[in-house]
Image (cartoon, helix red, strand yellow):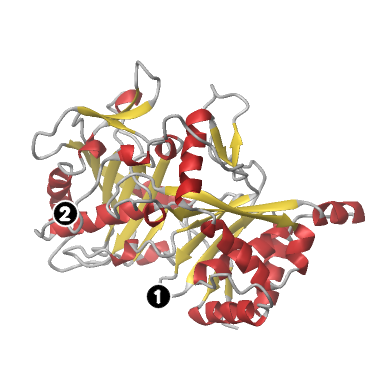
Amino acid sequence: MGTICVEPPSLLQDLKITIQNVSLVFPSQQTERKSMFLSNIDKVLNFPVETVHFFPSHKDFPPHLVAEKLKSTLARLLVPYDFLAGRLRSNPETGRLEIDCNAAGIGFAVASSEYTMDSLGELVYPNPAFGQLILKRMDNLEQDDQPLCIVQVTSFRCGGFAMGMFTNHVTFDGLSFKIFLDNLGALAADKPLAVIPCNDRELLAARSPPCVSFPHLELAKFLDSNVNHPVFDATSEALDFKVFRLTSGNIADLKEKAKASGGTHKDARITGFNVVTALVWLCKALSWDEETTQERNNNADRESTLLYAVNIRPRLIPPLPRSYTGNAVLTAYATAKCKEIEEWPFSRLVEMVSEGAKRMTDEYARSAIDWGEIYQGFPNGEFLVSSWWKLGFDEVDYPWGRPRYSCPVVFHRKDIILLFPDVDENNGVNVLVSLPSKEMSKFQSLFLNYLA
C-alpha cells in the first residue's frame, strides 16, 4: 500500500547536553534606534517557535568552526534584520505591542551532546527531547530584556551538529523565516544576501476607519480582552501520537480519487495539500469518541471546522513583496456537519478545503486585519492543520551543506495536526497526529482503509 503508520519508537528523553558558552550577538554595524510597528497578525502571534536543523559531519567544517562562522555571520545579518536584535515592548501611549529596535542583541549558545546523531533515531519522528537542542532564555537577563532570537549550536560525538533556533513568532512567519535562513547561508558563504528583506510592517496596517465586511467564522472574540489567551489551549488528557506517511504515489492516488468522484465539483484545486488536508479532515471529524447511539446521533449533527494558514502576499492588491519579513498568513477555514463529511464524495471535501483559500481575496484579508483592530480574538475551529511540508528549510544551502533534516520541536496537541516533509522522499509527506487512544484507533482505521 505504500502508506505506513509509524508506531512510536523508543525515544531518547535525555540528550545529555552540556552548555559550554552563552553570549549575546550584536549587529556588526550601528543601526538606527526606532520602534517597529507590528500588524494585527503579528501581535496575536506573541509566542515562541522552535526549530532544529540537523547537519552531518563535514571535514572542512567541524562544529566549533561552524559555531564561529555562524556567530560572525549573524552579527552581519542583524544589520538588515535590525528588528531581530530588538526587544518587545508595549507602546506607553497606545498600549500596542511593538519592537524596540535597540540593538540589544540575540542569544548564542555553544553546546555538546554525549550521543552521536544516529543515536537520536529517526529524525523524522518528532521527539520532544529535541527541545534540549534549543536555549529558550538567557538566565542573566530580565524577562523584559529577553532576546527575540536565540541560536544554539550543539555538536554530536560523530562530528555532526544541530542548529537549534528559538524565535518569537512576531518576528517571522514560515516563509519569511525560510528567506532569513537563505540569507544566513548566503552570508556564511561570503555571498550577497539572497533576498533583501522588506521590514515595513505598516503594509499590513488596518484601514482607517477599520471596515469588517465579512462574518469571519474562523475568528472568535475573547470574552475577557484583558487576559493573554493562547491561540490554542493545550489539553491535559493523555494522548497517543503517530506519524502517517504518505508517499508521492499515495498522494497521486488521492488526486485521482478526487477527480474520479468529481461530479459537478470541478472547481476544486486538486493539489497535494488540498487532498491530504481533505483526508485528514475526514478522519479527524469521524474519529470522535462515541459510545452510545445518542452520542453517534449528536456527532452526526456536530459541525467540524478545519483551519489552515494561507499566505496572503500574492493575494493582496498590490501584492506584498515576497521579501516581506512579517507574518503575512491568515486563517482559512472549511466547515460542515460530520454526517455531510461522511456522505459527500471526496471531491466535495477537496473543494471545501480549496474554497477556504479561494475566499482569501484582498478585501477578505483586509477585513480580517480590520477585525483584529476592533476585537481581541483568536482562530476558532476544531483543529488546525499546520503545514511545514513545502517551506523548504532543508533546502537551504550553507557552506557546510544542506541540513539532513529540519523540523519544529513538537509538543503533542489534539487540536493541531502537523504536515512534515519526508526525509526519504522529496514529494512525500508525514502527518503527525495526537489524539486520545480511542480516537486514534478510529483515525488510523479510517486513514488506512481510505487508502487501501
Quarter occupied by the N terminus = bottom right
Identity of the residue drawn at 71% across and 58% down: 285
Secondary structure beneath disc 1? loop
Residue 426 disc label: 1
Q: Position of residue 353 (x, y in %)?
A: 59, 62
Identity of the residue drawn at 55% across and 24% down: 225
Identity of the residue drawn at 49% across and 59% down: 11
Mark 1: amino acid: Asn
Residue 14 visible within the image: no
Secondary structure beneath disc 2? helix
Q: Which residue lies most toward the top here?
A: 93
Q: Nearer the viewer, residue 340 or 2?
A: 340
Q: Nearer the viewer, residue 271 or 65?
A: 271
Identity of the residue drawn at 12% across and 46% down: 76
Dot 2 crowding, Cα within 10 Å, few <14, some 14–19, many 20+: some
Query: Residue 341 sits in which quadrant?
Result: bottom right
Q: Nearer the viewer, residue 125 or 13?
A: 125
Q: Position of residue 237 (x, y in %)?
A: 67, 44
Name above or below for residue 181 compared with residue 137: below
Mark 2: amino acid: His
Residue 406 disc label: none
Q: Earlier in the sequence, mark 2 or mark 1?
A: 2
Residue under pointer 2: 64
Dot 1 crowding, Cα within 10 Å, few <14, some 14–19, many 20+: few
Q: Nearer the viewer, residue 280 or 274?
A: 274
Residue 448 visible within the image: yes
